[in-house]
Image (cartoon, coloured by chain):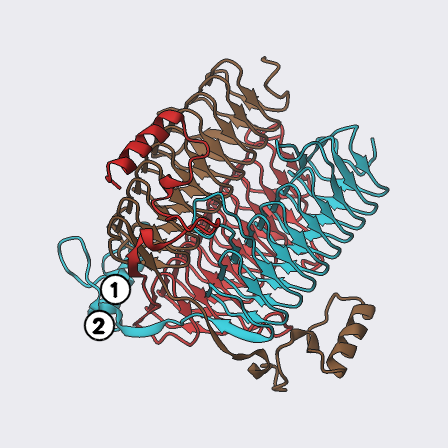
Chain colours: A cyan, B brown, C red
Amino acid sequence: MSPLIHPTALVSPKAKLGKNVSIGQFTTIYDNVVIGDDSEVGAYCELGVANKFSAGEALEIGVGALIRSHSIFYEASTFGDRLVTGHRVTVREKTRAGANLQIGTLTDIQGSCRIGDYVRMHSNVHVGQHSTIGDYVWIFPYVVLTNDPHPPSDVMRGCTIEDYAVVATMTTILPGVKVGKHALVGAHSLLGADAQPGKIYAGKAAEERGDVTAIRLKDGTRRPAYPWIRHFRRGYPASVIAQWEKMLDEGLV
Amino acid sequence: MSPLIHPTALVSPKAKLGKNVSIGQFTTIYDNVVIGDDSEVGAYCELGVANKFSAGEALEIGVGALIRSHSIFYEASTFGDRLVTGHRVTVREKTRAGANLQIGTLTDIQGSCRIGDYVRMHSNVHVGQHSTIGDYVWIFPYVVLTNDPHPPSDVMRGCTIEDYAVVATMTTILPGVKVGKHALVGAHSLLGADAQPGKIYAGKAAEERGDVTAIRLKDGTRRPAYPWIRHFRRGYPASVIAQWEKMLDEGLV
Amino acid sequence: MSPLIHPTALVSPKAKLGKNVSIGQFTTIYDNVVIGDDSEVGAYCELGVANKFSAGEALEIGVGALIRSHSIFYEASTFGDRLVTGHRVTVREKTRAGANLQIGTLTDIQGSCRIGDYVRMHSNVHVGQHSTIGDYVWIFPYVVLTNDPHPPSDVMRGCTIEDYAVVATMTTILPGVKVGKHALVGAHSLLGADAQPGKIYAGKAAEERGDVTAIRLKDGTRRPAYPWIRHFRRGYPASVIAQWEKMLDEGLV
């Protein structure tokens, strides 16, 4: 076995690994896997997981890949060269992705997606089945691309994110919606209709609602719930609590 | 040892496995675990994790379960037959769930919950402690069921999701709130009061806010921040950047 | 080897473990790791992951730590005493944290952050690079602290969360924004400007939008999409479907 394969790794003899491919400790490479030259697979990964939808097609990963630890890839997806992932990435079957894709930690690509070149998804992005993503697209943390127009149903309408578009943190794109080229969808938005090319879309920002002391405890006492140091002290040392008492006594908070 | 138990798995002799139960590579089954016949536990899982709240009660899982890889279940919860999970599921102690539960990848059930039959939670759902979920409920990605009416505090009011209700993607249900039978809470909403049975509830969608070029760089230059290809080029090859320059020169973007 | 180190764990002889430190099964401890006395590291963890930014500095963890399973810590961060984490935590390089930090399951700290004492982050929090968090701060599930004012760019402006502040579930803090002492940012909010000390900030809650039956199926039939039991029955047994038919026939839903 190659010295680049950790002795605790479980690598199927049917898997096709290129030259200079390293495999980390406790990682499993199943049968239907093809990995290009000069790639690195971290520890605790599973590559080539089979399921009833994958029909025995291979997972194919291009040259120069870096797959960080605890990641899971199913059979029957293909990735161009220089794939880079964070940790704990999950990628299901039947996705076709171009070169230079970056997938952040915890991101979950649900399968049957089309992804172009130089796409960068940050941490904890959820890409629903049948999404179509162009080239040079950016998707930021906690973005969800949905696909069911009236969940639950058997109707599936994937989203389309066109070239160069940017979808900012914690935004949901509703089913079948298209984000046009160079459009920017702002953080924490819900996009329910197509975003026109080159336009900004955004939801509503938080506003001041008064003093925190106006909120009362729902424990029957109606004491103020904030500052929370008045009533919540579990796990703090007596010295800290004494200091809080003093701050409260002196009206400092 | 059963040929269905991978040789690298660590299975306590005190655990009670039914007939035809398979255990994946590097998986740990601790002492207080009961798994029904015809079940499959994937790789890298931990079943029966003990903690100070579990008091040595068993984790009980019915027949026909499929628990996908990297999942963690604590002691002292019970699941009906035909449980199916995605990857990296976390389930804490003292949850009682019915039959045919589906739990998506990355979903986190925090413990002391009641869950009915045929409930389907999609990926990355967060179910706070003391939630009550009826039968045939659907919960979509990135939904959070909260429980503290004025965090942090020692007051805990779990949410209730009644039969057949649907909670769509990236919605937060505030503490103690009830979603009535057949109600639909739309994507990216914040539900702060009870949802009446059979009604739709939804938040506010994103609106167009003008051209992306109106946003200026905060690096002192006040150049336009979008299209981002004007100023952000790290990691792209020279050939791509040259093409972008040409597009910009020719006013194509 | 210490009887507290599981025989399947891979512990570098260069790592410096204090007295009474236990290491779980299949866990990897790399070279540049220092762990204080009376600490427990769960199973399937990786501590001391190297990368090009860490420059060979050690990961230093104080006494009395509890790091739950499947967690990943990079080199070149330091933590005070009594660190407690949930499962699947990810912490990148160059973070400096005080004592009594709690980090919830799935939380992702991206690196180069400053974190005070007694900070409690709940599950699935995302702390962007260069965030500054004071003492006694609370951050609840699915909160994201961002840092790029016009993503993607090379400009990075971390958020600041001052002492005792509370950021509730599924809230996004925009880049460079400061949450003042004792302020409360409500659930599911987008905070785009500084939150003044002791004030409440909140977004917009969901409103009733009519009957669920007003939503029509987009499969060409324009039948009602809700109650969904009218049209979506995949995977339910015939007996349940028969009961649903009866409920619908009798007008009970």
Please report the residue visible at 43 percent of the width from the left and 55 percent of the height from the top: B170
Name the spot of residue B175 as percent of width and height, x first: 28, 52
Q: Point out the image quarter for the N terminus of chain C.
A: top right
- Residue A226 image label: 1
- Residue A194 image label: none
Q: Point out the image quarter for the C terminus of chain C.
A: top left
- Disc on the earlier residue, 1 or 2: 1
Q: Is residue A236 visible?
A: no
Looking at this view, name the residue that lies furthest to the front. Answer: C221
Pointer 2: residues within 10 angstroms few (<14), some, or many (20+)?
A: few
Looking at this view, name the residue that lies furthest to the right. Answer: A19
Q: Give the answer, above or below, for where B197 lies relative to C22.
A: below
Marks 1, 2 in one chain: yes
User: Residue type at mark 2?
Assistant: Glu
Q: Chain of mark 2?
A: A
Pointer 1: residues within 10 angstroms few (<14), some, or many (20+)?
A: many
In front: C45, or C117?
C45
- Side of B185 where C93 appears, left or right: right
User: Residue type at mark 1?
Assistant: Tyr
Please report the residue visible at 35 percent of the width from the left and 76 percent of the height from the top: C196
Which type of secondary structure does the marked residue at label 1 adopt? loop
In front: C110, or A177?
A177
Between circles 1 and 2, the one closer to the viewer is: 1
Q: Give the answer, above or below, for where A3 lies relative to C56.
A: above
Name the spot of residue B72 as percent of width and height, x first: 48, 35
Name the spot of residue C214 as percent of width and height, x first: 33, 55
For disc 2, the marked residue is: A250
Please report the residue visible at 23 percent of the width from the left and 57 percent of the height from the top: A231
Which type of secondary structure does the marked residue at label 2 adopt? loop
